[in-house]
Amino acid sequence: MIHKTPIAILISGRGSNMRALIESCARPDYPARIALVLSNNPDAPGLAVARAAGLATQAIDHRDYRRDRAAHERALDTALRAAGVEYVCLAGYMRLLTPFLTTAWAGRMLNIHPSLLPAYPGLHTHERALESGARIHGCTVHWVTEGMDEGPIIGQAAVPILADDTPDVLGARVLQQEHRLYPAALHRVLVPDAAPAATASDCLLSV
Ligand code: GRF
């Protein structure tokens, strides 16, 4: 039987990328299992989704730590270690991380970002892509390092920008690809020798 590496998923909101990872991890041949879904937001809708899937969840509310980011991150780190987690997937986790957590999990923490990095780090990526006049947009899974959205790229998926796109329409097209990219990129990290993920004609995916 395939070895399943224990992972955690960190969310702040709806958790659609988390859902894609849950679906992949449910497959017997996928090399990861979800040991914990962790959120800084007790009201994150994704927590209910994770619970309904029978997963262990925990909310560690950053507001309980006032402005002490380091103390909040120490609590996250303790929860991750207690759950036996080996890799951490940020999936719409909306807190900036300090060097404490990025160093503690260096080489073991991934993030998904809705642009073709290094273009458009930060927020409002779909608006910025449309304003730029670019013809191609997409998403990136990368290693988490101290600088925001700056770590080495693990994989990317590209989508066309169409003439009548709005940020929402473009964002939905990108999100569809995020849901393919994240499981493929995590697979590549855990099983580096595996065959590359197939590409589809509606997008270019490379991990
Ligand atoms: C995604 O667009 C992801 O790339 C970004 O935040 C969003 C999270 O969406 N980091 P969801 O919670 O996974 O649906």
Image (cartoon, rainbow, N blue to C red):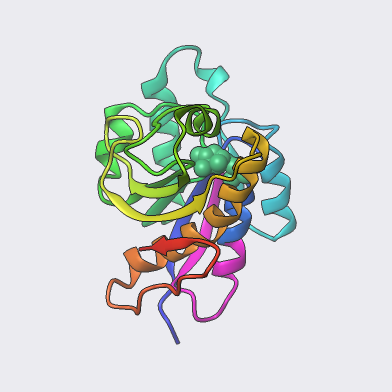
The percent position of residue 72, horizontal first and vertical second, equals 44, 26
Kindly give the residue lying farthest to the bottom in the view shown. Answer: 1
Residue visible at 44% across and 41% down?
115
**Apparent side of residue 199 relative to residue 99 in the rendered image (left or right):** right
The percent position of residue 97, horizontal first and vertical second, equals 37, 29
Is residue 31 on the magenta stretch? yes
**Apparent side of residue 149 relative to residue 72 in the rendered image (left or right):** left
Inspect this view and state whether residue 29 appears.
Answer: yes
As rendered, which of 23 and 135 lies closer to the eye?
Answer: 135
Query: Is residue 15 depicted above or below 75 in this figure?
Result: below
Is residue 127 on the magenta stretch? no
The percent position of residue 144, horizontal first and vertical second, equals 32, 41
Residue visible at 58% across and 51% down?
17
Inspect this view and state whether residue 56 appears.
Answer: no
Residue visible at 34% across and 48% down?
142
Query: Is residue 200 depicted above or below 203 in this figure?
Result: below
- Give ligand 1's quarter of the image: top right
Kindly give the residue lying farthest to the top in the view shown. Answer: 67
Picture quadrant where residue 76 is located: top left
- Give the quadrant of the C terminus: bottom left
Query: Is residue 151 depicted above or below 195 in this figure?
Result: above
**Apparent side of residue 64 relative to residue 101 in the rendered image (left or right):** right
Residue visible at 40% across and 77% down?
3
As rendered, which of 102 and 197 lies closer to the eye?
Answer: 197
The percent position of residue 146, horizontal first and vertical second, equals 27, 31
- Give the quadrant of the N terminus: bottom left
Query: Is residue 180 depicted above or below 152 in this figure?
Result: below
Q: Which segment did they paint magenta?
A: 22-38
